[in-house]
Amino acid sequence: MIQEPQINPQLGPIIAKQLQMMIKQPIDGVHVIFNEQDVYDIQADIDGPVDTPFQGGVFRCKLILPPQFPQMAPKGLFNTKIFHPNVSEKGEICVNTLKKDWNPIQWSLKHIFEVIKCLLIVPFPESSLNEEAGKLFMENYDEYFKRAKLLTSIHALKQEANVLKGNNQIVFDEADKKNKVNQIQQKKENDQKKWLKRI
């Protein structure tokens, strides 16, 4: 059985340090999800920038490191569905920083996520992965804006009842918990009244 090449283990501490720095000194609108069990699982939630069709949405972004990293650039992927010229329907991200402008010596995860966030503000339809989105952006921006906003409302809106804790577990807000307990209690009381009426 042929074993697949692995990423250089010496990169682990470097990646972990960069991720921890991004948690301590976060990029505005970019929330790193730190996986203590696997530092190579690099993900972040990106807030949709203001005055874009993505405003109000949260987009989960993942970086996939190839075995040749950092000589070869990572791949960027949106796990959240998005209608954008430079993002394919599968979520693949096309940006020069991860292609021809990749620098294997002066790379940083912070810079990569900054570039991806900027891509949500200023798309590059000339190098579209989603041809439909690129064409609409160039020829009928209003229609592009409506379509992108619609997909944002369907796939990327924040869940107000949930909050993301530092340990990366999504837990219900305390008020929401109390509300659910009250609803269950009320239902029990109503069911009990109905049962008493029957007898």
Image (tube, helix red, strand yellow):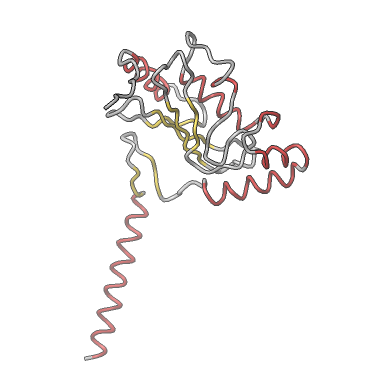
Which quarter of the rendering shows the N terminus?
top left
Q: Give the residue drawn at x 52%, y 45%.
A: 156
Q: Quadrant of residue 180?
A: bottom left
Q: Give the residue drawn at x 68%, y 42%.
A: 132
* Residue 108 at x, y percent in the picture: 47, 16
Q: Give the residue drawn at x 29%, y 24%.
A: 3
Asked whether, in this view, residue 98 is left or right of residue 166, the answer is right
Query: Residue farthest to the top?
Result: 105
* Residue 98 at x, y percent in the picture: 54, 21
Q: Quadrant of residue 62?
A: top left
Asked whether, in this view, residue 13 is left or right of residue 48, the answer is left
Image height check: is 199 above or below 85?
below
Asked whether, in this view, residue 1 is left or right of residue 91, the answer is left
Asked whether, in this view, residue 23 is left or right of residue 119, the answer is left
* Residue 103 at x, y percent in the picture: 52, 12
* Residue 152 at x, y percent in the picture: 57, 46
Which quarter of the rendering shows the C terminus?
bottom left
Give whichever of 171, 196 is nearer the camera: 171
Image height check: is 97 above or below 151?
above
Query: Residue farthest to the right?
Result: 139
Give whichever of 165, 156 is nearer the camera: 156
Image height check: is 9 above or below 179?
above
Query: Residue farthest to the bottom?
Result: 199
Q: Give the residue drawn at x 59%, y 25%.
A: 95
